[in-house]
Amino acid sequence: MKIGILTGGGDCPGLNAVIRAVVKTARTSYNMEVLGFNDGYHGLITNQSRRLGRRDISGILPRGGTILGTSNRDNPFKYTEVIDGQKITHDVSGRVMDNIEKNGIGAMIIVGGDGTLSIANQFYKMGVPLVGIPKTIDNDISATGVTFGFDTALVTATEAIDKIHTTGESHHRVMIVEVMGRTAGWIALHSGLAGGAHIILIPEIPFSYDAIVNKIVKRSGYGKHFSIIVVAEGAKPKGGNVVVKRMVEDASEPCRLGGIGNVIGDIIEKRTNIETRVTTLGHIQRGGTPSAFDRILSTRFGVEAVKLVNEKNFGKMVSLRTPDIVPVSLEDAVGQIKYVPADCGLLETARLMDISLGE
Ligand code: F6P
C-alpha cells in the first residue's frame, strides 16, 4: 500500500511532527510507502511529490512549518490558472483523481484546517479513500477537543503579553496585544488569562467602548495606571463590524482580518488621555518549535491516521476526546466552526477574576 500525504492551509507548529509520525508508523509498523505532495493541493493538481524516507524525517520533530510546504489558495474545485494568456477559474478535480491513480496511491492523509478538510471531504465523496488530521492555531474545528498548533501559539502569545506587561507598567500606558484566531476567540481568551490581561475582547462577545474605558479609568482610580488588553483579530464593537485587512483572491476563505487593535487604541487614547500602544503578534504565532503538548498530539494524530488507513476506515478525521484519539466522520467534522460558547467555563473564570470582557 502507498499512502499520499499533504499539508494544506496556514501552517502551524506540529505539522512536521505529524509527517514524521505518519512516515515512521507506515514504514516500520505496516510496511507502507509514503509519498509527500508539495504545497497542499497544488502538488496534487500538478503532480509534484516525493517519496518520504527515513532521511527526510530525520530531525524534523522540533521544527516549525512543514517540510512539504503548504498553500491556502489552491482549491482543486475552483482553481485559477492562466491558459492561453487568459486567467480562468475552473474545476480541476479530475487532474487530482488522475494523479492519485497514476501514483498508485491506496489512501491519502490530508492534514489541514476546516477549508482543507472540507475539500478532502468532497474528494472522499468522489471515491478517494482518505483520512483527515485537524490542524490550526485557531482551535476552531468542532469535532476535536483541541487542534495541534494551538498550544504553541498560546505559549508564544503568553510570552509576548508578559513582555508587554513590564513595559506597559513602567510607562503607565494602555497596552493592546492583537492576536490571531479568525472568527473564534480561543487564542485571545486563553492567552489573555495566562498573561494576566485586564481586558479580553473576543469575537463571540461584541464589546462596548464604554465598558473598556470604564475598566481602564477604574484601574487608574486605585493606582494602577496601566492596563493590558488582549484583543482577537475578529473582535468587533456592539453593532459594528470586524476590521478586514485584505481579501486573498482564490483562497477558499478569502477574508483576512486585522487592525482592530489600532482602532481600539485610538479611541481609548482620545477618551482617557492615557498613552496607548498596540502590538500585533501576527505570524509569530504560527512559527517556532512545537510545545511538548503539540508534539505529543501531532504524533498521536499521525499514528492513529495510519492505523485507520490500515483498517480501511476511510472518510474519518482523527480527533482528541481526552484522553483518547478517536475517529469521527469527516462529513460531521467540517463546515462547523467551533466558537467560544456562551457557557464556556473560562468566561466565568475571567468574570469572577474581574477581567473585563468588554460587556
Ligand atoms: O487560520 C490560521 C491563521 O493564522 C488565522 O489565525 C489568521 O487569520 C490567518 O490564518 C492568516 O492567514 P494568512 O497566513 O493568509 O495571512
Image (spheres, rainbow, N blue to C red):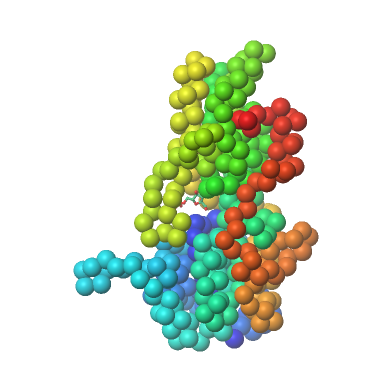
The spot of residue 265 in percent (x, y) is: 48, 27
Q: Quadrant of residue 251?
A: bottom left
Q: Quadrant of residue 26?
A: bottom right
The spot of residue 143 in percent (x, y) is: 67, 61
How many tags in the picture?
0
Residue toward you, 121 or 65: 121
Residue toward you, 81 or 296: 81
Give the residue at the far right of this rendering. Answer: 323
* Residue in the image at 65% along x and 46% along y: 340
* Residue in the image at 47% along x and 39% along y: 241
Give the residue at the far left of this rendering. Answer: 85
* Residue in the image at 42% along x and 80% along y: 94
The spot of residue 82 in percent (x, y) is: 27, 68
Is residue 255 found left or right of 315 in the rendered image?
Answer: left
Query: In the displayed structure, would residue 221 be above or below residue 25?
Result: above
Is residue 345 found left or right of 78 in the rendered image?
Answer: right
Query: In the displayed structure, would residue 111 be above or below residue 230?
Result: below
State which quarter of the image contains the N terminus: bottom right
The spot of residue 215 in percent (x, y) is: 62, 22
Is residue 53 at least partly visible in the picture? Answer: no
Query: In the displayed structure, would residue 64 be above or below residue 46?
Result: above
Give the residue at the far front of this rendering. Answer: 239
Residue toward you, 256 or 26: 256
Query: In the displayed structure, would residue 93 be above or below residue 337?
Result: below
Is residue 273 at least partly visible in the picture? Answer: yes
Q: Quadrant of residue 243?
A: top left
Residue toward you, 90 or 166: 90
State which quarter of the image contains the C terminus: top right
* Residue in the image at 68% along x and 38% along y: 194
